[in-house]
Amino acid sequence: MIYVTRKSHFTAAHRLHNPQKSDEWNRNTYGPCNHPNWHGHNYVIEVTVAGETDPDTGYVVDLGELKKVIHAKVVSVCDHKNLNLDVDFLQGIIPSAENLARAFFLRLEKDIDRITPHGKLFSVRLYETERNIAEYRED
Ligand code: NI
């Protein structure tokens, strides 16, 4: 099995807030990430496809095609947006790095299957900062 990764970037605002809980619980749990007037991150998303190489091309996936899918499904809809308010497929979830990584995986999966006859989407890693990273895999 070979693993191929494409990295992309976007910038977005969010707020971590659980409306089922008190304001005090939210402040204590999320600290500055609960700030009512939002804050931003320079997100980095790494999408890894696993599979065998196509005998004709030597590729697991055409990285140009993978780049287009990531841009169409994630970057173009999240970049310079407020993740709590502006992004339809993120409505109703707390936009933690964990929840975002899962939501991006589920949104990318079908299109990546389409461009990868010899492989499949393996993982989505989301860097909220250089040091805080969440990864979603279906295993
Ligand atoms: Ni944050």
Image: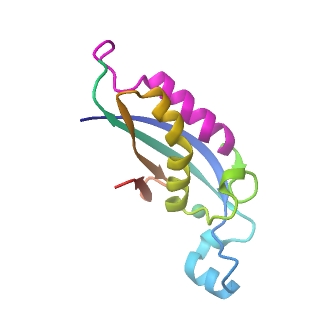
Specify whether residue 19 is painted magenta: no
Closer-to-camera residue (10/98)? 98
Q: Residue at the left extreme?
A: 1
Q: Main secondary structure of the magenta part?
A: helix
Q: Is residue 19 visible?
A: yes
Residue for point 42% across, 22% down? 62
Residue for point 33% across, 14% down? 57
Q: Which residues are magenta?
A: 55-78
Residue 77 at x, y percent in the picture: 68, 42
Residue for point 57% across, 48% down? 42
Left or right of residue 17: residue 129: left
Q: Quadrant of residue 76?
A: top right
Residue for point 63% across, 80% down? 26
Residue 61 at x, y percent in the picture: 39, 26
Locate the C terminus by quadrant.
Answer: bottom left
Q: Quadrant of residue 95?
A: bottom right
Locate the N terminus by quadrant.
Answer: top left
Using the image, determine if residue 20 lies above or below residue 83.
below
Q: Is residue 128 visible?
A: no
Q: Ligand 1 is found in which quarter of the picture?
A: bottom right
Closer-to-camera residue (2/96)? 2
Closer-to-camera residue (137/16)? 137
Residue 122 at x, y percent in the picture: 37, 44
Residue 33 at x, y percent in the picture: 61, 69
Specify whether residue 56 is painted magenta: yes
